[in-house]
């Protein structure tokens, strides 16, 4: 039911709060994943030896920089990505923003940059989303994608960390990602990440090197590329911008975080949800997490702890590419793709197909995860943060 551009949202949702003031003048039935210039962005600067102190919400627009800026010459920068979701009652929720803040801090350390504190980061996200609140799509129509950047904005010539940094954040309404099952191709020549490199942080420089493999794959009709480990080319790592899971019988596996895989927040959340559903998740960090979580919630009894600690239940996993041939289901995870089923994977001219649609593990996880994110399912873990 396409509606003419410019129509207010009151006809497209059932919420009583929906009116021209609540929502921007935008055709919410047509929201995709393209650039939409929203009203405000956030800017905070730090100078040499100083941490970030005070940032501001400013009108969205171009930024000015010296041609010598560290980011332009040497790629000193990090990206982040998270979403704001509309609840049925019109209120707005963020999903685990402190996780993005922590990941940015770790990345900043690796890239020799100062970073905003977790509190500064979360506050900046709240302020930016609040200022652009009428750009958060109605429930069911999409979400507001938040893109923080931390960049070396000061001038350098000889290679060294930049003398000034800018923490920048803009937002963009995006549609629900439903392109149908993904058809992946395994890339065995080009690599996304190498041991000791920056594949485990959201370094800006990680992304354009992936474009060649991605463009070639798309030209052949594939949706995305699945990368192998750069050392042995035997184990699967992840897709260009999302993590991967495989399902075999009642075991869900995902490559362990070993330094060449981006520790996705969606990935982490899926593991926690899957464990609650009673699936075995083959991953060692899960073990640590479950114990910590149970302890901090004072929820464990001794019997339960012993059960969790049985290593044959929670096996550490590097996933050989051959395991793809045996899997029942495969799915990808990330803030943008949420949980997207994989319909097929092609490896050296061999194509394997997987179960998709209703009754799949990925569908069950998707309903639960998006339910929590949009406030339809009770958030027992304190993952959501309201923007008031
Ligand atoms: C951002 C990203 C992910 C997913 O992380 P989320 O926190 O779940 O959005 C996975 N892989 C790569 C390479 C990424 O850049």
Image (cartoon, rainbow, N blue to C red):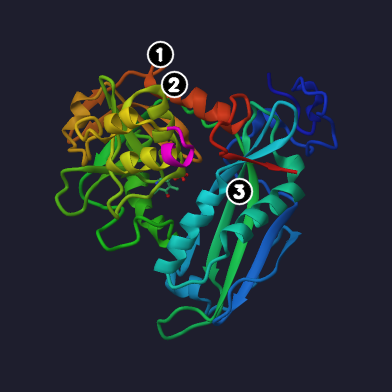
Q: Residue shown at 57%/30% (left/top)?
A: 372
Q: Position of residue 305 (x, y in %)?
A: 32, 33
Q: Within the image, what quadrant is residue 110 found in?
A: bottom left
Q: Position of residue 167 (x, y in %)?
A: 60, 65
344 vs 94: above or below: above
Q: Which residues are magenta?
A: 294-299
Q: Earlier in the sequence, mark 3 or mark 2?
A: 3
Mark drawn on residue 307: none
Disc 2: residue Cβ within 8 A of ligand 1's nearest atom: no
Disc 3/disc 2 C-alpha distance (Å): 25 Å
Q: Which residue is mark 3?
A: 146
Disc 3: residue Cβ within 8 A of ligand 1's nearest atom: no
Q: Residue shown at 43%/68% (left/top)?
A: 109
Q: Which residue is mark 1?
A: 359
Check contact, mark 2 vs mark 1: CB within 8 A.
yes
Q: Which residue is mark 2?
A: 363
231 vs 297: above or below: below
Residue 149 seen in the current view: yes
Considering every residue shown, the one lying at the far top of the view is 359
Q: Secondary structure at mark 1?
A: loop
Q: Residue shown at 62%/62% (left/top)?
A: 168
Q: Within the image, what quadrant is residue 14 found in?
A: top right
Q: Position of residue 283 (x, y in %)?
A: 28, 38
Q: Earlier in the sequence, mark 3 or mark 1?
A: 3
Q: Secondary structure at mark 2?
A: helix
Question: Mark 3, residues whose alpha carbon is within 10 Å: few (<14), some, or many (≥20)?
Answer: many
Disc 3/disc 1 C-alpha distance (Å): 32 Å
Disc 2/disc 1 C-alpha distance (Å): 7 Å
């Amino acid at each position: 039911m396409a509606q003419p551009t410019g129509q207010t949202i009151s006809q497209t949702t059932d919420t009583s709060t929906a009116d021209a003031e609540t929502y921007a003048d935008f055709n919410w039935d047509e929201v995709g994943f393209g650039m939409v210039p929203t009203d405000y962005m956030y800017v905070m600067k730090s100078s040499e030896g100083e941490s970030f102190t005070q940032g501001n919400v400013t009108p969205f627009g171009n930024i000015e920089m010296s041609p010598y800026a560290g980011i332009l010459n040497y790629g000193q920068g990090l990206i982040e990505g998270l979403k704001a979701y509309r609840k049925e009652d019109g209120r707005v929720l963020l999903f685990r923003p402190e996780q993005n803040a922590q990941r940015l801090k770790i990345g900043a350390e690796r890239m020799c940059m100062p970073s905003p504190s977790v509190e500064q980061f979360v506050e900046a996200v709240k302020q930016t989303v609040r200022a652009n609140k009428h750009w958060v799509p109605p429930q069911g129509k999409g979400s507001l994608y938040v893109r923080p950047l931390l960049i070396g904005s000061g001038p350098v010539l000889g290679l060294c960390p930049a003398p000034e940094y800018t923490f920048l954040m803009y937002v963009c309404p995006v549609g629900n990602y439903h392109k149908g099952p993904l058809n992946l191709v395994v890339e065995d020549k080009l690599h996304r990440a190498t041991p000791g490199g920056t594949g485990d942080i959201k370094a800006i420089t990680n992304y354009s090197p992936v474009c060649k493999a991605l463009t070639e794959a798309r030209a052949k009709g594939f949706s995305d590329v699945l990368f192998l480990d750069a050392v042995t080319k035997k184990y699967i790592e992840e897709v260009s911008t999302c993590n991967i899971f495989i399902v075999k019988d009642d075991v869900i596996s995902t490559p362990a975080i070993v330094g060449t895989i981006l520790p996705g927040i969606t990935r982490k959340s899926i593991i926690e949800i899957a464990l609650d559903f009673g699936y075995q998740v083959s991953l060692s960090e899960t073990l640590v997490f479950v114990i910590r979580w149970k302890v901090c919630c004072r929820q464990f009894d001794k019997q339960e702890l012993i059960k969790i600690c049985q290593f044959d239940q929670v096996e550490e996993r590097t996933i050989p590419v051959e395991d793809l041939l045996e899997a029942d289901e495969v799915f990808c995870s990330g803030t943008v793709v949420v949980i997207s089923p994989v319909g097929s994977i092609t490896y050296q001219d061999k194509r394997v197909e997987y179960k998709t649609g209703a009754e799949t593990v990925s569908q069950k996880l998707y309903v639960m995860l998006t339910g929590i994110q949009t406030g339809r399912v009770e958030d027992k873990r304190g993952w959501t943060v309201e923007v008031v």
